[in-house]
Amino acid sequence: MLHKEPKISLIIATYQAGDLLQACLDSIQKQSYKNIEVVIVDGASTDATLSIIESNNALISTHISEPDNGIYDAMNKGIQLATGDFILFLGADDTLLVDLAQIAPLLCQSNTIYYGDVLFKQSGIRYDGEFGAYKLAVKNICHQAIFYPSGVFKNYSFELSYRLLADHALNIKLYGDKNFSFSYFSYIISRYNQTGLSASTIDSTYIAARMKLIYDNFSSLVYLYAKLRMLFAKYVLRKRQYATQ
């Protein structure tokens, strides 16, 4: 059992985010909860990102700017810099919506991954409720809604071979790890930009590995369900392609 005011680390990965970062930082500045730290890991931006970081120096606990190997490399670097009991990852184009003073008292178990919902920035759709094994096998919890206990990262990190969906791979592994549990609360944590790279690009390495990840971490019934869903999706895609020929 953790104390009632756990320290929350907000890790923000940035690159060329000069026109986006200030709004993200403003949403953090408005927080009434004070036991937070802001960690920014920048990928050697050459636009206004660094000047924005400098102008918000009083809010930002730690920042680095250096070349990296993508967003998950930056997030792994942020984990190494963070000192909080729980970690929430934000993009430079995301904004916090929840008052962390409401969330902090709920973060009471060091082996529990707590999560809520996000609000899609463009469509205004709320995503996406409680996840069980069947749901997590076919779609992901948005990482801008997840409070990971820092102990998760003693044995886990984001795999850099998955360029866009390393967070889904991590969540599947954590769901299969009996040392951890997941707990949902019905709060909208952040406003999430749904038009980023992951919305328009396929992570072929993750797709190739996904069924084995499900097989290794879920029951045979969940695996069968995911397999049937995948086969049906391929069938529908082929049918559409045939219809357009």
Image (tube, helix red, strand yellow):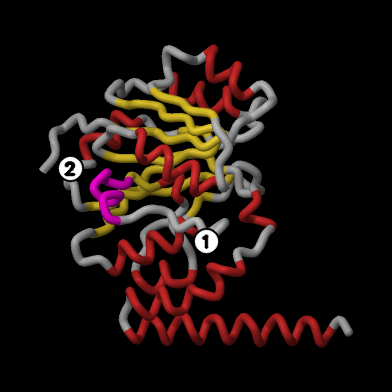
The residue that disc 1 covers is: 161
Question: What residue appears at the point 69 percent right and 57 percent down from the top-left corner?
Answer: 200
Question: What residue appears at the point 56 percent right and 50 percent down from the top-left corner?
Answer: 125
The residue that disc 2 covers is: 108
Q: Is residue 22 above or below residue 132?
A: above
Q: How many marks?
A: 2
78 or 186, which lies in front? 78
**Where residue 178 sits in the image (x, y, percent)?**
20, 66
Q: Is residue 235 magenta?
A: no
The C terminus sits in image quarter: bottom right
Question: What residue appears at the point 65 percent right and 26 percent down from the top-left corner?
Answer: 18
Residue projecting furthest to the right: 245
In the rendered structure, the answer to whether residue 68 lies left or right of residue 117 reads: right
- What main secondary structure does the magenta stretch of the protein show? helix
**Where residue 36 sits in the image (x, y, percent)?**
32, 26
Residues drawn in magenta: 148-155
The N terminus sits in image quarter: top left
